[in-house]
Image (cartoon, rainbow, N blue to C red):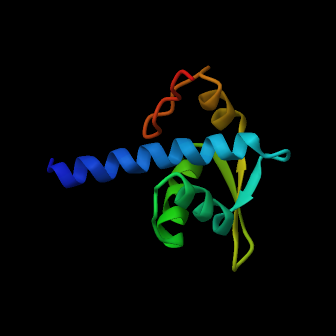
Amino acid sequence: MSLTTDLNAAIARDARLAILNELAKQVDGRLNDQAMTHVLDVIGVRRSRDWVRTQLRALAELDAVRLIDLGELLVAELTATGRDHVERRIIIEGVARPRDV
């Protein structure tokens, strides 16, 4: 693997953890892709909305989120599996591990 490929994979893993963390903070465990793009921008992961949607779909394949497609918006909802990862009860491959604070 090249350095660029490794870096892109690490950014994706970190972004997926940030997505799960943000969903866990929401009262209803939900957030749309447009809002999530802004959340990632704030932490320095400046990527397109399509890239964010790709990460959401990857998390859905890992059963960490459920997706609701509203056409213009893609809403992600945290699942029990996603919450278990955030709360360090399980490890989801492809998602960075939560760090000690």
Residue 64 visible, this orientation: no
Q: Position of residue 67 (x, y in %)?
A: 68, 58
Identified at 49% across, 49% down, the residue is 15
Identified at 70% across, 46% down, the residue is 23
Identified at 52% across, 63% down, the residue is 52
Q: Position of residue 47 (x, y in %)?
A: 45, 66
Determine which quarter of the picture holds residue 86: top right
In the image, is residue 63 above or below residue 86? below
Query: Does 23 sit left or right of 42 as displayed?
Result: right
Query: Does 14 sit left or right of 26 as displayed?
Result: left
Compare residues 26 and 89 and report the one nearer the observer. 26
Of all residues shown, which one is farthest toward the right?
27
In the image, is residue 82 above or below residue 56? above
- The number of numbered discs placed on residues in the rendered structure image is 0
Determine which quarter of the picture holds residue 88: top right
Of all residues shown, which one is farthest toward the bottom?
72
Identified at 75% across, 41% down, the residue is 25
Compare residues 81 and 95 and report the one nearer the observer. 95
In the image, is residue 3 above or below residue 37? above
Compare residues 30 and 81 and report the one nearer the observer. 30
Residue 98 visible, this orientation: yes
Query: Does 45 sit left or right of 69 as displayed?
Result: left
